[in-house]
Image (spheres, helix red, strand yellow):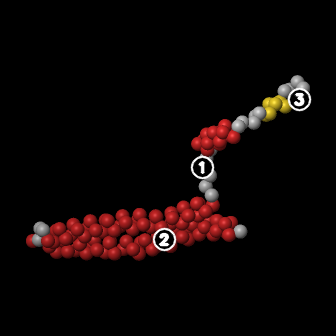
Amino acid sequence: MDNRNRENGSTFNYTYSAKEQEELKRIRRKYAPPEENKMELLRRLDRSVTEKGTVISIVIGVLGTLIMGLGMSLAVVWQGMWFIPGIIIGLIGIGILAAAYPVYNHVIRKERERIAPEILRLTDELMK
């Protein structure tokens, strides 16, 4: 703490003990914005690329599985007039399910292109 007396220009200094300093730092850390080092940022950016592709491909895969299951149910359980439409719906579901992996690869490729400049900048800074 630094207080100046305006009349004579004298200075008053006070230093907290080590225990009080630690308490001050601990309290300050609670309210200060979190500091993210460059390596953590690099890891987070790299993870974000695959996470987006994974989420999209899982959603497509689940949707395709549900549609395939509907088709199988129509073809096997209700047979009769629903047999042919059930097979067609099941094949559509298999097609959607099969598209999940190519969609994953496409999303990963696009995300890597989008994030590449930032990743390269960070790696250049970290390698210096």
Q: Is residue 3 above or below residue 60?
A: above
Three-letter code for the amino acid on which mark 2 is drawn:
Ile
- Toward which corner of the image does residue 82 lie, by quadrant? bottom left
> How many other residues sit within 10 Å of disc 3, few (<14), some (14-19) or many (≥20)?
few
Q: Which residue is mark 3?
A: 9
Q: Is residue 60 left or right of residue 12?
A: left
Mark toward the viewer: 1 or 2: 1
Disc 1 secondary structure class: loop
Q: CA distance from mark 2 to mark 3?
A: 65 Å
Residue 66 screen position, x and y as percent = 26, 65
| Residue toward you, 13 or 60 | 13
Q: Which residue is mark 2?
A: 108
Q: Residue at x 54, y 70 (%)?
A: 112
Answer yes or no: is residue 72 visible: yes
Q: Which residue is mark 1?
A: 34
Three-letter code for the amino acid on which mark 3 is drawn:
Gly
Q: Decide which of tag 1 and tag 2 comes sooner along the chain.
A: 1
- Toward which corner of the image does residue 115 lie, by quadrant? bottom right
| Residue toward you, 58 or 36 | 36
Disc 2 secondary structure class: helix
Three-letter code for the amino acid on which mark 1 is drawn:
Pro
